[in-house]
Amino acid sequence: NRKNDLAGKTIVVTAGGTREPIDPVRYIGNRSSGKMGCALAAAASARGASVKLVSTVDMPDSSGMTVIRVETAAQMLEAVRGAVKGADALIMAAAVADFRPLTAAGGKIKKNAAPLDLKLEATPDILSEVKGDFIRVGFAAETADLIDNAKKKLGGKNLDLIVANDVTAPGSGFGADTNKVTLLFKDGRAEDLPLMPKRAVAEKIMDYLATMLN
Ligand code: PMT
């Protein structure tokens, strides 16, 4: 790998999709497998960073990392808030729910409750809520107008870098081992990457992070 170019740096990475409970046995989820976030954590760790992984999934080999397991957007927000204290960078690869049930039923909802109305409320936006003096990297999972939508999130969420992820391209996005992304920087630079393994995408992001941090 590329030397120890992240030695002495602390990097917080989020991975996986949040699960928002409907009742004790059901949740609203999404198709994120956590592979992209885990690849970022592995790449940062291999390059010498101290990694704090806030994840909804188990990391295959998390030796040397601090892993904080969470389920909901609210739990992820609290974990990230704690983890970023003293950190050099936050990378939000997790697919955080935008909506959650207004209330979760205390017991399993019975089938005869159909037709069932679920009222949803907005979840907190982690990137907007968590403030501090560290590099902020977001992802934008889009199904249309990739670059325009990603640019809006870059500015709106006050990010240094956004990874625009076309989740409709073959072999790209949720669940795949490969990904097709465009990196968009705060200063207007852009780099369009070919379809490549998620670990290779992660190394590219770490190249830029190492430059920004050193
Ligand atoms: O996990 P995999 O199967 O490997 O798939 C990878 C991926 C497709 C999930 C990943 O590459 C990706 O695109 N992650 C971001 C998914 C997402 O939630 O995108 P978004 O456009 O809805 O959110 C924009 C950014 O804001 C993201 O960095 C997200 O983490 C963050 N966010 C979103 C909602 C919220 N309430 N709080 C946030 O901080």
Image: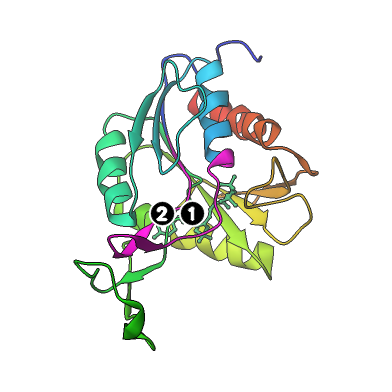
- Structural crowding at the residue carrying mark 2, measured as other residues with C-alpha within 10 Å and reported as few (<14), some (14–19) or many (≥20): many
Q: Amino acid at mark 2?
A: Thr
Counting from the top left corner in percent of width and height, residue 96 is at: 43, 56
**Disc marking residue 18:** 2
The image quarter containing residue 5 is top right
Quarter the N terminus occupies: top right
Magenta-highlighted residues: 13-36
**The residue carrying mark 2 has its beta carbon less than 8 Å from ligand 1:** no
**Magenta highlight on residue 185:** no
Q: Residue at x 38, y 62 (%)?
A: 27
**Magenta highlight on residue 32:** yes
Q: Amino acid at mark 1?
A: Ala
Q: Is residue 117 visible?
A: no
Counting from the top left corner in percent of width and height, residue 147 is at: 67, 62
Q: Residue at x 64, y 29 (%)?
A: 203
Q: CA distance from mark 1 to mark 2?
A: 7 Å
Above/below status of 83 relative to 122: above
The image quarter containing residue 108 is bottom left
Q: Is residue 136 visible?
A: yes
Above/below status of 205 relative to 105: above
Dots 1 and 2: beta carbons under 8 Å?
yes
Q: Residue at x 64, y 67 (%)?
A: 148
**The residue carrying mark 1 has its beta carbon less than 8 Å from ligand 1:** yes
**Disc marking residue 22:** none
Residue at the extreme bottom of the image, as rendered: 115
Q: On the image, numbered disc 1 is attached to which residue?
A: 95
Residue at the extreme left of the image, as rendered: 106
